[in-house]
Image (spheres, grey):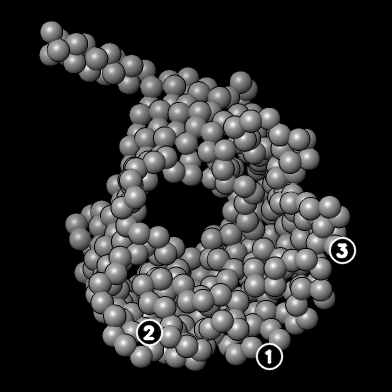
Amino acid sequence: MKKLIGALALAAMVATSAFAEISFGGWVRTLPTYVGSDGEDIKTAALSASWGGPFWARWDASWTSDDGKAGLKFKLAADKGGVGTHDDVGIWLKPIDQLKIEIGNLDNFGGLRSDLGFGSWNWLRPSTIVVEDEGITFGRGENGQGLGLLITPTDALKIAVVTPLENTLQRGDIGFGKASVAAGYTIDGLGTIKAGFFGEYNAAGDASKYGRIEGAFDLTGVDKLNLTVGVAYRLASSDYWKTADKTKVIDNYMLKAALAASYGITEAFKVSANFAMLMFNKDVLDDPAMQFGVGADYALSDSLNITADVRMLMPNNKKDAQLSFLVGLASPIGSNASLGIGFQGEVGFGKDTFNTSSLKVVDATANDKFIWAVPLKAELSF
């Protein structure tokens, strides 16, 4: 009887899939590190992902109806703590071709975030990266539970509206204070102009943070060149700046200006660079902070690639600059995986800088100590 029920269930699934599109995919990156130094002692045996968490494996499944009017997205993430849903889970509906409604966990809804990652962003991420490579010139709103409207009046224009949803009803200022609206207009053969407001409502009396206004331009019309430039301005009351946490600079800058670019000099050789500057209200910090990065990727052969980068963070208030570097080698394994080994180092961090070392597998013993790590990198996607 159990076999019969199983066969009927399988037949029903196959019959259903004949009238719809079903897709599966997965991705994992893990960085086992067996040797490193905190500036004084040799350390051994740690496991991390690029963003500092443990081993992560992600599995995606999606279903789209045969008429393209509805669909389901489901993403699981597994680490040493267990298995749970990830950033992008939910259902979507298209009552008309120009409107898509999505409900669930929304991540980079509308796909407008400007990303240009290279070098150590894809290995152990150092503390020299305060403004992240993902969203460096144009970010995203709350990437959590909510309702999104994607409006496409024309093929060139895209408008994404997201309203976060809690599990219980909220006051209006809280419920809508973290909503966002962003738009992108693509000029054929040139690039995309973007503008948006991302709500960050947080209030305690008169100390209120409202959100940030962002604008950017992604140049894609030049062969082998990707270039993005953008600015962001944060809105908050004067009382908010007086109480802002000075150590959380990425949450409390007033103005951000950034650019990033990559260029393929040859089929085998690509160079990348970025720059970001943060300026603050006088009640937070006096001087701007700046970060720089430059990197290169070179295919030594069909079976061996080398990547390298140097990153620098220049904190304000006469704090010492932070410097990090990476040299990594990687080789493809089959058609869907790669295996690599790198050497990463960092110096200039400490309690008097913006944050401690993000080389998560090694913590420094003191300021100005040179720390290093030799991570392996295993990566797979399908």
Q: Residue at x 74, y 51 (%)?
A: 202
Say what secondary structure mark 1 lies in.
loop
Precedes in sequence: disc 2 or disc 3: 2
Q: Which residue is drawn at 60% across and 90% down?
A: 320
Q: Residue at x 64, y 39 (%)?
A: 164
The residue identified by callout 1 is 318
Q: Which residue is drawn at 82% across and 57% down?
A: 207
Say what secondary structure mark 3 lies in.
helix
Query: Label 1 neighbourhood size at 10 Å, few (<14), some (14-19), many (20+)?
Result: few
Query: Label 3 neighbourhood size at 10 Å, few (<14), some (14-19), many (20+)?
Result: some
Residue 11 place in picture, x, y as percent: 23, 14
In the displayed structure, 7 sits above or below 299; it is: above
The amino acid type of the residue labelled 3 equals Ser
Query: Label 2 neighbourhood size at 10 Å, few (<14), some (14-19), many (20+)?
Result: some
The residue identified by callout 3 is 238
In the displayed structure, 316 sits above or below 268; it is: below
